[in-house]
Image (cartoon, helix red, strand yellow):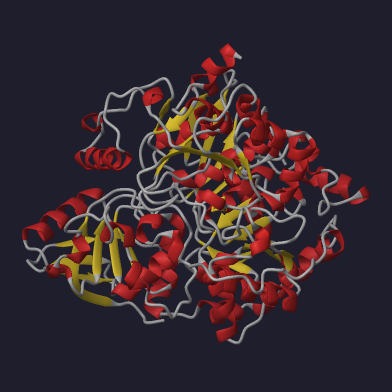
Amino acid sequence: MPGTGLTIFDRIWARHRILENVAGEALLYVDQHFLNETSFICFQELERLGRTVRRPKQSFLAMDHTVPTHHREAGIPNAENREAIEYLDRFARKTGMAYIGVDDPRQGIGHIVASEIGLTLPGILIAGDDSHTTTNGAMGALSLGIGLSEVTHVLATQALWQAPYRKLRVTFSGSMALAVDAKDLVLELIHRIGAAGAIGHFVEFAGAAVSALSMAQRMTICNMAVEAGARAAIIAPDETTFAYLKGRPLAPQGKDWDVAVTEWRALRTDEEAVFDREVEIPASEVAPTVTWGTSPQDAIRVDGRIPDPKDAGSAQESARAEAALHYMGLAPGMRVTDIAIDQVFIGSCTNGRLEDLRAAAAIARNGRAVVPAIVVPGSQEVKREAESEGLHLVFRAAGFEWREPGCSMCLGMNGDLVEGGKRCASTTNRNFMGRQGKGARTHLMGPAMAAAAALTGRISDVRTLLERA
Amino acid sequence: MEPFLRIEGIAVPFDRANVDTDQIIPARFIMKPRQFDYSKVLFHDLRNGPAAEPGFTLDRPEYRGAKILVTAENFACGSAREQAVYALQDTGIRALVGPSFGGIFYTNCIKNGILPAIVDATVVSALCAALLRSPGSVLAVDLPQQTIATNDGKWFPFRIGEGDKAQLMGGWDDITRTLEHEQAILAHERATAATATWTRPSFDEAIGLRRPIPFAKARDER
Ligand code: SF4
């Protein structure tokens, strides 16, 4: 429908609006509800309230946050984690929820599994017990991260109250330079608008550089939109999306597929639509990027130098930057490529997909890791595909460890931790203090850059490594 | 849930930007039942161990029993973990005052009867300056009036969504209230099913339920 001035959000929102209250909040229908082990309190609460799961088939429970990534045969060592998993396993079987358990051949990080099995489709509304539920916006779904109270509410009602939203469009124009990754685009965005820059906003990613991205790269960008505070992120579905979804087990099949694609093509933002805010970043301005501090906004070009906290915009920001440098054990003016690292983590829902592993392996092929490095595929499916291409052999030959899928060192709940004071080059999404372990120092970067760091033992410009190769 | 109208209590100046929920409660503490006293782990790693911050604000005696936290931009960003709210709640915090909050955290507060009051950054500076001048002093937060008053008679307005305000003041049980609209939810489900132009395979047929987990009797961690 041209000429109506609607955004893609307005279209999906309207389709899911059950009613509105006097305060202008909408009760939205939730098509798919994503859950993980950390949701167990909600199930206990539901039982305490004497309520049931209203739509078990629309409740997708995947085990990812706490599962071990090696020696699985020995079981789940941590008692709290194990008890929660056992409790949820019983609960899922009893209620008939859509369930991917620990030993399921499709086990993996929920957001990654959901895209692989075709659970995430354009135009649907997803609510998930995880802030990175934004990842699923890459397929054109309206996908909202929620907390435990809301999860309990969705379990009982299959609906979610949402206040009106503001709209931000981020346009990555032009095209990316060689060796620049989607991770670099999104780190640059967070750096420019700040970790609070998109609070309260639904964010649409658009522009030539976004259209040119693969689905895996789109997921990386939508995944990290929440690090700028976004409530949701979306990319309008296009031919890349349809090609990705076609044939997935839960995608519509046969005639239904054609009907669905016709409908999905209409899921876009009208030219006349007005956003509350617009940000444009020429993709050609983006270089390989890493973080130096304790917020994802502390991002800098890999060929840059650590900024001086004195130059920060405000006294408060100076103090924060100073504390961040202190925690990270770095000094202003230092060259980023002079930072020595102790270990490397490649994985997570940000960069744990096949394409990410390929990018890392392409670098790993050229040398040998001089620091401990682990590769954790995002799912069993990713692991199988990677192994069929021989990527595990590449990694092993280069001295990287090849593990079982899960969230792993992204937040260390399964015991995969970075020791206090150690410095990790990580493909994850959060460099918060203690995120990867008490006192751990995290530098966020893309998968090729992380692999390069493993080979050199310091933060390295992947472009110079490629030149040499 | 306890309705929120007006509270008066000791306020803590906590003027730091981008405090994330991993700092408020590290991930290793979130697998505990709600009955656990989460106050024990609030800002755990900033308060315990060799890397602890000496004289961490919340540990200072003048802030014992505080009910209000005055925070800077983007407080409690990051992870969705509602345990961050539990940790504040179990410590006795009833209201937070700041220019912005992590989006999911903000909603988590409302659902637990905690007020996230939004003020301009200049108000945070003014309040923190006043609180630092006389540590342990009291603020009064009035939700119906949407004001924060200092004990020397100054007051500042704060912002809050209309629906959030009503929910806090009513102390509603969300689920019961939503299920008053059961008919509307059902009607929506039926209408969507009736007008659906395509369907997808069922999860059980396409993916199926798998074997039970073989981990039932694993060793405990030492
Ligand atoms: S990989 Fe990290 S960010 Fe992603 S779901 Fe797991 S813990 Fe969350």
Which one is in front, B170 or B28?
A: B28
Which one is in front, B170 or B45?
A: B45
Please provide percent x and percent y for residue A159.
62, 68
Which one is in front, B200 or A95?
A: A95
B160 relative position to A126: left or right: left
Image height of A199 relative to A275, above or below: below
Please provide percent x and percent y for residue A43.
59, 76
Please provide percent x and percent y for residue A154.
61, 70
Classify residue A153 by image quadrant. bottom right
For the N terminus of chain A, give its image quadrant: top right
Classify residue A421 by image quadrant. top left
**Residue shown at 39% from the left, 51% from the top:** A434
B215 relative position to A21: left or right: right
- Which residue is farthest right? A255
For the C terminus of chain A, give its image quadrant: top right
A395 relative position to A290: left or right: right
- Which residue is farthest top? A467
Q: Is residue A30 shown to the viewer in this render?
A: no
Q: How many marks?
A: 0
Please provide percent x and percent y for residue B107.
45, 64
**Residue shown at 70% from the left, 73% from the top:** A92
Q: Is residue A414 shown to the viewer in this render?
A: yes
Image height of A297 relative to B115, above or below: above
A289 relative position to A18: left or right: left
Which one is in front, A129 or A263?
A: A129
Classify residue B170 by image quadrant. bottom left
